[in-house]
Image: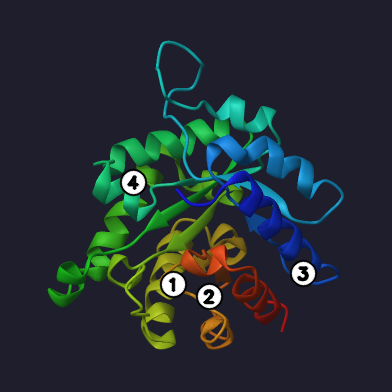
Amino acid sequence: MNGSLTESRKLVETIKEGVAGGAGRRVLVCPPFVYLSSVAGWLAGSDIALGAQNLSEQRKPGAFTGEIAGSMLKDVGCDYVIVGHSERRTLYAEDDATVAAKFMAAQAQGLTPILCVGETLEQRQRGETHSIVAAQLQAVLDAAGVGAFSRAVVAYEPIWAIGTGLTASPEQAQEVHAMIRAKIAVLDDTIAAGLAVLYGGSVNGANAAELLAMSDIDGGLVGGASLKAPDFVAICRAASH
């Protein structure tokens, strides 16, 4: 929940200029709902894709005041949508079942869901990282099946490393990313190999290259640094090497 119309335009135009001509990478921006149509227009003619930060689990429009249907997102040009972001889970009590329903609602409208999973600091300190992340994944696997992950992205976002300035070491992040891929591989090797697994814990221009050098870290789900065009562009450029 950041930015204004003016700030959003400046941010998008600077990002467009900064990432133009970059090969071998996909760039996506996910502005607040009210700016989606405007951003779609500003992105026209660029290689940058558009996504939303959330959607309703309801499959069809109806009497759900304040909610946004996946069909509406598709209608204004979105190709992606984030589901299960840690802030939705922690601040708005979205549980694994709700996240799985949103994942499937997104795919029903032809949107690619970016499924967020991750543990709190307390859970990590108790040695529960793998079990927590595995359970979050399993909820979606049980509901949607492994085949659905051929049309999805997974983002590992350790909650303790979001907006805190703390970052999982490349080795810590790689360990969890490898576990995520292995869990999918047990069910389908091909889908696991093609699955993009992003890291989302305080990625910035200074640490992006080191994180992205890890074999199972395919990209970043960028938070605070995405509000600063030079930082976001630096991350995008790191992803091209």
Q: Position of residue 116 (x, y in %)?
A: 41, 55
Structural distance between the alpha carbons of marks 1 and 2: 6 Å
Which residue: 24% across, 41% down? 93
User: In the structure shown, which secondary structural element does the residue marked by tag 4 occupy?
Assistant: helix
Query: Are circles 1 and 2 on residues that touch, CB within 8 Å?
Result: yes
Q: Position of residue 220 (x, y in %)?
A: 54, 69
Query: Are circles 3 and 1 on residues that touch, CB within 8 Å?
Result: no
Is residue 214 left or right of 179 when viewed as pictured? right
State the residue position of label 3: 19
Structural distance between the alpha carbons of marks 3 and 2: 20 Å
Camera-nearest label, 4 or 1? 4
State the residue position of label 2: 217
- Pick whichever, 170 or 139, lies toward us: 170
Structural distance between the alpha carbons of marks 3 and 1: 26 Å
Q: Residues within 10 Å of mark 1 (few under 14, many from 20)?
A: many
Q: Amino acid at mark 1?
A: His
State the residue position of label 1: 177
Q: Residues within 10 Å of mark 3 (few under 14, many from 20)?
A: many
Q: Amino acid at mark 3?
A: Val
Structural distance between the alpha carbons of marks 2 and 4: 23 Å
Q: Residues within 10 Å of mark 4 (few under 14, many from 20)?
A: some
Q: Pick the quarter of the image with the C terminus.
A: bottom right
Q: Amino acid at mark 4?
A: Arg
Direction left: furthest residue: 126
Q: Amino acid at mark 2?
A: Ile
Does residue 199 appear in this view? no
Q: Earlier in the sequence, mark 4 or mark 1?
A: 4
Structural distance between the alpha carbons of marks 3 and 4: 29 Å
- Pick whichever, 10 or 17, lies toward us: 10
State the residue position of label 4: 88
- Pick whichever, 225 or 90, lies toward us: 225
Is residue 76 left or right of 207 when viewed as pictured? right
